[in-house]
Image (cartoon, rainbow, N blue to C red):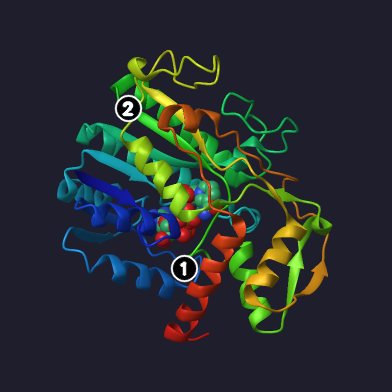
Amino acid sequence: MRYLITGTAGFIGFHLARRLLDEGHFVVGFDGMTPYYDPRLKEARHAVLARSNGFRPVIGMLEDADALTRAAELAEPEVIVHLAAQAGVRYSLENPKAYVDANVVGSWNILEVAKQAGVKHLLLASTSSIYGANEKVPFAETDKTDEPMTIYAATKKSMEVMAHSYAHLYDIPTTAFRFFTVYGPWGRPDMALFKFVEAIENDRPIEIYGEGQMSRDFTYIDDLVEGIVRLIAIPPAEENRVAEPAGIDTLSRHAPFRVVNIGGGQPVGLMTFVETVEAAVGRPAIRKMLPMQPGDVPRTYASADLLKALTGYCPETRVADGVAAFVDWYRDYRIAVGP
Ligand SMILES: NC(=O)c1ccc[n+]([C@@H]2O[C@H](COP(=O)([O-])OP(=O)(O)OC[C@H]3O[C@@H](n4cnc5c(N)ncnc54)[C@H](O)[C@@H]3O)[C@@H](O)[C@H]2O)c1
C-alpha cells in the first residue's frame, strides 16, 4: 500500500513507518524536524528509515499547505496517518501558539490533502489528555471530552471535531485514535521515562510531580503500533459497527468517523513507575517531590473495550519489560550520539 505518514522523525511515526516499510509498503514521511527537542534524535530516526528502499522523506511544516500537497503528490496515498503535532502538555503553557499552528491549522491542512487525495482511510493521533480531569474511569470514548485542561488537549479536540465535519462532507473514512502515555526505545526526551533515566544515570534528582499521587496508563510502543496497524485495516463504516458490547462504538451516525482509545487499561502509580525505572537502571533515584503542575491531570486510564471489539487486540507488554527495553536503547543511543 501507499502511505503518507506525518511525524516520521518523531517517536511514534518512526516506529509505525519502520513497521510498514518492513512489511514492504511505500511510505512518504513528512516532518518539519522542529526544535522542540534535540533534532539529532529526529535525524537518527530518519536515518534508520532511509535504509529502506520504500521510504521517501519530505521535510516541511504542516502549516505549509504547498509542502503538504507536494508530499501527497509524491505519495499518491491510499492511507494517511497524521502523527506530526506539537506534543507535550507542559510546553503548551509556555508556547500555546505552536499548538494552534501545528495542531489546528496543520491538521486542517491535512484534512484538505486527504480530501484532494481521496484516501481510503485517514487516521489521526489524538490524546488521552482530552478526557481532562474526568473522574469516571476507565475513560471510555463515549465519555464527555468538552473540558480540556490545557491548550494541547483543546487543539487535539479541535482536530477531532474538524475531522468529523470533513468525514461527513467529503466522505473521508476517518479514525481518530487517542493515545495514552506511549513509551519505549527511541522515545521522547521531554517525557518522564527519558528524563528519569537520564537524571539517574547522571546523578541528578528526578522531579516527581503531584507528590507522586498521579497515575498513568502506559502503552508500550510496539503495542501501540500493533493497534494502529490493525485499525488501518478497519475504516469506519456501518458494516463494521460494533454491536456488542452495546453502546461502546463511537462510529458516527452522520459520517464514516470513529474515535478509538489505544491504551492497555492498566494504570500505574507514579511511585511504582519510579521504582520500576530504578530497577531497570540498577540504581536508586534522588527524588524531588513537587506539587501538581498547572494543567496536569491526576490520572489517565483507558478503556480498551472498543479497540478489542474492533481488532481483537489489547496492549499487553508489562511496564517492567518495556522500561528495561528503553534503558537498553538509551545506553546505546548515548554512546552513539554523546550527551
Ligand atoms: N507519545 C505519547 O505518549 C502521545 C500521547 C498522546 C498523543 N500523542 C500524539 O501522537 C503523535 C506523535 O507523538 P510523538 O510522541 O511521536 O511526538 P514527537 O514529538 O516525537 O513527534 C512529532 C513529530 O512531528 C513533527 N512536527 C511537530 N510540529 C510540526 C509541524 N508544525 N510541522 C511538521 N512537523 C511537525 C516533529 O518534528 C516530530 O518529529 C502526536 O500527534 C502526539 O500529540 C502522543
Disc 1: which residue: 35
Q: Residue 29, percent across and down?
A: 28, 56
Residue at the spot 48% in from the left edge and 33% down from the top edge:
307
Work out whether 139 lies above or below 284.
Answer: above
Is 238 on the left-hand or right-hand side of 276? left
Disc 2: which residue: 173
Q: Is residue 287 visible?
A: yes
Q: Residue 59, percent across and down?
A: 29, 62
Work out whether 160 lies above or below 89.
Answer: above
Residue at the spot 18% in from the left edge and 48% down from the top edge:
75
Mark 2 / mark 1, whichever is N-terminal: 1
Q: Quadrant of the N terminus?
A: top left
Is 163 on the left-hand or right-hand side of 29? right
- The amino acid sitting under disc 2 is Pro
Task: Please tell me how crowded label 2 is: few (under 14), some (14-19), or many (20+) other residues with Cα within 10 Å.
Answer: many
The Cα–Cα distance between marks 2 and 1, rounded to whole angstroms, is 33 Å
Q: Which residue is more in the foreground, 297 or 227?
A: 227
Q: Which residue is more in the foreground, 334 or 36?
A: 334
Callout 2 secondary element: loop
Residue at the spot 63% in from the left edge and 70% down from the top edge:
195
Callout 1 secondary element: loop
Q: Residue 81, percent across and down?
A: 34, 44
